[in-house]
Amino acid sequence: MEGNIGYRLSDPDERADRYKEALGEILLAYYKRASAEAMALFESRRGFYEESFCRAFQKAEEFLKAAAGSQQKGKITYIHLSYLLSGALSGEQLIKMDFYDARHYRDVEETDCFWDYSGLFPSYDRERKDAEAELRRRIVRMQSGELSRIGIGMTACGAPALKPILKELAASREFLRNIRHYCGCPAYILYGAYLDEAELLYQIEIE
């Protein structure tokens, strides 16, 4: 057993390397477990999650109706689904859904809503506590900033695990039925970190 070796590491560079190695191993193991768990839960309760995704959109739909009536917002061209690293600090697990017209980020009529995906990662809190304990065991004198990276890393690991699930939800019949009325042709559903690069999940065509 490796045990806590921090007291033997007088070289700060060596300690930093040990910390990065330990954190990387913990996060990789978490990603593998979380990805499998999230997909299994989604498949077992697909209808529930499709419904909750549509309910989240309904909150934005009120603003979309009002914006369309004011003629300050055009047809929706870009729908951004963003994961929030701030959730590592707030304890929330939310996808932010932003709806933009053809002006994209220059769209002056902000329209958004949030989807809570915490049910797909029920082991998150326990895994985070276990990860903190494992780091404390392997590296002494752990600082609060070092420990906070666990939550940020686990939230970031959840992002690729969510991608195939969000792709299914974005293409679900009920969601498309609800949103098509507000969309231009074509409209793009994108996914990525909030206000960062995003990739195409689904392209909506208007019949």
Image (spheres, rainbow, N blue to C red):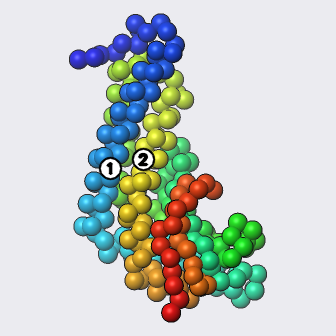
Q: Which residue is mark 1?
A: 34
- Label 2 near label 1: C-beta < 8 Å? yes
* Gap in angstroms between the C-alphas marked 1 and 2: 8 Å
What's under tag 2, amino acid-wise? Answer: Cys
**Can residue 134 be seen by looking at this rendering?**
yes
Quickly name the residue at label 2: 157
x and y percentages locating residue 124 in the rendered image: 37, 46
Tag 1: Cα neighbours inside 10 Å, few (<14), some, or many (≥20)?
many
**Total marks in image:** 2
Would residue 57 be found to the left or right of residue 98 on screen? left
Is there any visible trace of residue 90 in the rendered image? Answer: no
Q: What residue is at 45 percent from the left and 36 percent from the top?
A: 150
Q: Residue 52 falls in which quadrant of the image?
A: bottom left
Label 2 residue SS: helix
Give the side of residue 163 with respect to residue 200, left or right. Answer: left
Q: Position of residue 172 (x, y in %)?
A: 39, 78
Q: Residues within 10 Å of mark 2 (few under 14, many from 20)?
A: some
Up-down relation of residue 83 to residue 69 (above or below): above
Compared with residue 133, is residue 50 higher up or lower down, i.e. above or below?
Answer: below
Q: Please name the amino acid that badge 1 sits on.
A: Ala
Considering the image in quadrants, where does the N terminus appear? Answer: top left
* x then y, percent, for residue 19: 44, 24
